[in-house]
Image (spheres, rainbow, N blue to C red):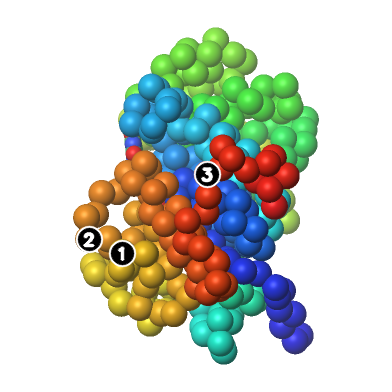
Amino acid sequence: MPETTQEGFDVAIIGGGPAGLFGAFYAGLRGMKTLLLDALPELGGQLAVLYPEKYIFDVPGFPKILARDLVKQLVEQAMQSSPTVRLEEQVTNIEPIGERQIKLSTTRGVYQTKAVLIAAGVGAFAPNKLDAPGVARLEGNGIYYFVRSKEEFADKRLLIVGGGDSAVDWALNLQDTCREITLIHRRDQFRAHEGSIKDMYASRTNVMTFWELKEVHGEDKVEAVTIVNNQTKEERELPMDAVLLTLGFKADMGPIKNWGLSLEKRSIKVDSKFATSMPGVYAAGDIAAADVKLDLIAVGFGQAAIAVNAIKTYIDPKARLFPGHSSEMSDSAKSH
Ligand SMILES: Cc1cc2nc3c(=O)[nH]c(=O)nc-3n(C[C@H](O)[C@H](O)[C@H](O)COP(=O)(O)OP(=O)(O)OC[C@H]3O[C@@H](n4cnc5c(N)ncnc54)[C@H](O)[C@@H]3O)c2cc1C
């Protein structure tokens, strides 16, 4: 099938973590047509996948804020100018194809943009998978790594595997949706918010510690699981309709290493305007090897603002670098 290319973007932002989200907001403020892509099904980067329930104390204006709440605010701010958002799309290649034109290929499509901001953090996040019989075969047919819609779990017998925030949160959030919820964890300590753990034990979730998933059974959909107690070696077969694996994430810089950009260890070299070695391609946040490298949210915000304003002057050499003060713009100017 011939590739259809979506054209007409001023800037494509790779990565929807804090740097990418604030970059998307700023691009909107500067009237740029923006594409925001992330490999994950949700926005927020490390904050959303690694520590949603942790408080952050060093974001200006917030004496303390939960990572998940900061993501919510950042998303609301970024969406004011309605950027095109593509989730579950990993960018696999970028390639200059002419004067101020870059072809961007993803796992799902092809886009054309005048400039690119790489805000890819520590790389694309993907869920850790489990190498147990039946798991890979039944992926998409009862084996889940994310909850995209609670409806998918309506009236199902669900097995949640894991002991982190996601496992505990979903055990609580799916209470009214599932017929039965069993949660197994290989240890008896959970890495989740204390209050949520208490709530889970008080809920109708059947919590089983020291149990692991051994096998998933079913022809073309999940029908049962075998679990094993790692202390006593006892095995049990339980009828089940769905399995949600919440085993953490691994980040992979992957394809970015092959895009022909100058790199410094696992980061991309940038100049004082956060331009990389490839014309029209900028980098901000944890992925950027700036002169002073401080992998912090507040630093990424500033870098994204500088990069996006520099991108504005790159795609429109008559434009000013200084965006003006947002406090002096009308509401309508801020949202397109
Ligand atoms: C446990 C923990 C606690 C922390 N606490 C704090 C704190 O208190 N204060 C603080 O300032 N910082 C803290 N940090 C650091 C902070 O989270 C990072 O500095 C910040 O998330 C970097 O933001 P980013 O937008 O550059 O990248 P990320 O948050 O890493 O987001 C990058 C996004 O890009 C996506 N991506 C990557 N490659 C691709 C690709 N090829 N295609 C599509 N998408 C891609 C990824 O899926 C990811 O969603 C903490 C980090 C951790 C792990």
The reply to whether the residue tagged 1 has its Cβ within 8 angstroms of ligand 1 is: no
The residue that disc 1 covers is: 272
Q: CA distance from mark 3 to mark 2?
A: 27 Å
- For image coordinates 35% across by 60% down, the residue present is 287
Q: Is residue 155 left or right of residue 203?
A: right
Residue 122, horizontal then vertical, whole percent: 37, 56
Q: Which marked residue is nearer to the observer: mark 2 or mark 1?
A: 1
Question: Which circle marks residue 176 in the picture?
Answer: none
Compared to 157, does 23 lie above or below? below
The residue that disc 2 covers is: 291
Residue sitting nearer the eye, 293 or 45: 293
Q: Are marks 2 and 1 in contact (CB under 8 Å)?
A: yes
Q: Which marked residue is nearer to the observer: mark 3 or mark 2?
A: 3
The residue that disc 3 covers is: 325
**Residue type highlighted by circle 2:** Asp
Residue sitting nearer the eye, 243 or 97: 97
Compared to 86, does 173 lie above or below? above
